Image (spheres, rainbow, N blue to C red):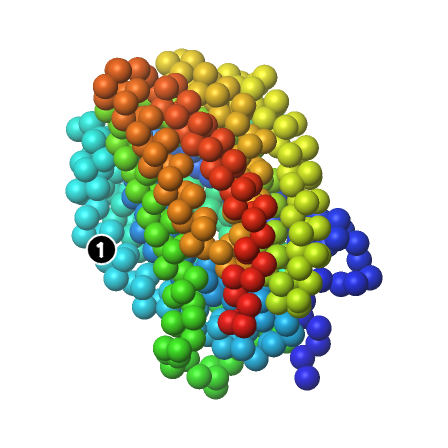
């Protein structure tokens, strides 16, 4: 018989449970964001053209990854439910179904991305000077897209079991390799001075291509490590090659009921990002680079918010699976208070040190000036954004993906996209107007998620269909 698999422990306070689950997620997200920041700084040192060549591809990549990740979300929610209900056999069956689904969907999507490597930056409105670098980056990243999806889904599955330490440890190792690989592959061979001694450091001098190769290689290795651990370690999550990996269409239908609205939400968010990114691209290379660097810096600041959102999805799912609705509400209430307090402090830091933060990523004075003003705007929205993230995470943990999709559709397309198009293409304002539209979208989403949660229908969304 399997040992207790749920993270919910009556001997621990709800606050300690939240921290136990969220802290490793936070550390992992900070690590990944810092690595992304280091990547950005390394590429940024090559100039605004290189930065724009990489960043212009991010929104389309998110769109393709979102297709697979939406199915991963459905699996994660159902796994958390069954973990809470101590039904580990079905949870492990869902793990196997998740693996074959990611491989089946991720492979053709990666091929599609490779085939469209040259077209994507053109469709995004990139200027001629960045198209070659952008296409090169796309082709290399396409080789790891299925593995990236697998890695994200497996990480979410570990969290569904309440294990947030394993992804943290693994990502620490993998991202260290990524940074080292970037340093070697991006730059030319050069000398560095260590304690007065000149040391020659080998460099491949591949520029943007080097960054892509390092990212792809580390992603593939990370996916294999997480997958191998599922087969090797003696834990409640352990699966075997002797188990059935045949598609279970009845189970996949259950997953689809949750995943399809989540997929539409991903399309909504990623599609909006594509449109906003193309709108920003029309403002020129400096605007693209400034927007990318401000977004990178803000993502580091918002790591606690993402951690709380991920943690509450697992906690609500396990609580409802165990039939403890009041505990789920207590988790949400405490997580909101923690999230608001933490994000107020980090937002204040972003606002005060905006110029210095952007200066870490690039020496270009034009980008520093515009990017720091953009970062000030993003800093103001941190608290409403984290509350919206926590509410949406709670609703998803309950299986209410339809509600989150509808709210996201209304706010992103009715506020963010419409506002960006009007301010830039009609009124001819600049990048800062786009960011104001984005921030307004976050406020609207927070208000709508708040009312959706207060109605309480999420408590019975999956009742009888765990």
From this viewpoint, is residue 51 visible?
A: yes
Q: Is residue 202 above or below residue 256?
A: above
- In front here: 453 or 291? 453
- In front here: 288 or 343? 343
Quadrant where the C terminus is found in the figure: bottom right
Task: Give the quadrant of residue 103.
Answer: bottom left
Residue drawn 48% across and 84% down?
A: 243
Residue drawn 58% across and 71% down?
A: 82
Q: Is residue 372 above or below residue 251?
A: above
Label 1 Cα neighbours within 10 Å, binned few <14 / some 14-19 / many ≥20: few
Quadrant where the N terminus is found in the figure: bottom right
Furthest toward the bottom, the residue is 242
Residue 66 at x, y percent in the picture: 37, 52
Task: Give the quadrant of residue 282.
Answer: top left
From this viewpoint, is residue 167 visible?
A: no
Q: Is residue 257 above or below residue 444?
A: below
Residue drawn 64% across and 72% down?
A: 85
- Compared across the picture, whether 212 is left or right of 93 comes to left
Residue drawn 70% across and 76% down?
A: 3
Secondary element under disc 1, as helix, strand or loop, is: helix
- Compared across the picture, whether 418 is left or right of 183 comes to left
Residue 216 at x, y percent in the picture: 37, 51
Q: Which residue is mark 1?
A: 112
Residue 405 at x, y percent in the picture: 41, 49
Residue 159 at x, y percent in the picture: 58, 59
């Amino acid at each position: 018989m399997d040992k207790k698999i749920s993270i919910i422990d009556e001997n621990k306070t709800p606050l300690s449970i939240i921290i136990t689950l969220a802290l490793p997620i936070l550390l992992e997200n900070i690590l990944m964001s810092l690595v992304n920041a280091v990547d950005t700084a390394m590429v940024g040192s090559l100039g605004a053209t290189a930065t724009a060549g990489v960043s212009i591809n991010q929104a389309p990549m998110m769109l393709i990854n979102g297709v697979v990740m939406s199915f991963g979300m459905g699996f994660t929610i159902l796994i958390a439910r069954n973990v809470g209900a101590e039904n580990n056999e079905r949870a492990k069956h869902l793990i196997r179904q998740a693996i074959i689904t990611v491989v089946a969907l991720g492979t053709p999507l990666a091929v599609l991305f490779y085939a469209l490597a040259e077209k994507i930056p053109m469709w995004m409105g990139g200027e001629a000077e960045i198209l070659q670098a952008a296409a090169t980056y796309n082709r290399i990243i396409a080789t790891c897209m299925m593995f990236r999806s697998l890695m994200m889904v497996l990480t979410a599955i570990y969290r569904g079991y309440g294990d947030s330490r394993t992804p943290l440890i693994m990502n620490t190792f993998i991202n260290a390799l990524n940074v080292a690989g970037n340093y070697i592959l991006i730059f030319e061979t050069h000398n560095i001075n260590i304690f007065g001694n000149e040391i020659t450091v080998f460099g491949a001098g591949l520029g943007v291509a080097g960054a892509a190769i390092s990212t792809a290689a580390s992603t593939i290795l990370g996916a294999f490590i997480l997958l191998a651990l599922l087969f090797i370690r003696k834990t409640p999550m352990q699966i075997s090659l002797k188990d059935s990996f045949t598609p279970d269409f009845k189970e996949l239908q259950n997953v689809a009921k949750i995943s399809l609205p989540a997929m539409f939400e991903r399309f909504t968010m990623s599609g909006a990002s594509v449109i906003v990114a193309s709108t920003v691209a029309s403002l020129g290379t400096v605007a693209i680079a400034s927007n990318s660097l401000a977004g990178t810096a803000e993502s580091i600041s918002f790591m606690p918010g993402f951690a709380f959102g991920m943690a509450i999805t697992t906690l609500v799912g396990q609580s409802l699976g165990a039939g403890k609705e009041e505990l789920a509400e207590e988790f949400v209430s405490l997580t909101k208070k923690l999230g608001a307090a933490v994000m107020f402090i980090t937002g204040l830091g972003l606002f005060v040190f905006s110029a210095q933060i952007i200066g870490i990523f690039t020496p270009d004075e034009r980008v520093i000036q515009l990017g720091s003003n953009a970062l000030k705007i993003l800093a103001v929205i941190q608290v409403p954004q984290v509350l919206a993230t926590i509410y949406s995470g709670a609703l998803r943990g309950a299986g209410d993906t339809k509600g989150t999709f509808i709210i996201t559709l209304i706010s992103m397309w009715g506020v963010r996209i419409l506002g960006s198009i009007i301010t830039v293409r009609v009124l001819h304002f600049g990048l800062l107007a786009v960011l104001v539209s984005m921030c307004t979208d976050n406020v609207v989403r927070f208000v709508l998620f708040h009312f959706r949660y207060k109605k309480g229908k999420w408590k019975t969304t999956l009742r009888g269909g765990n």
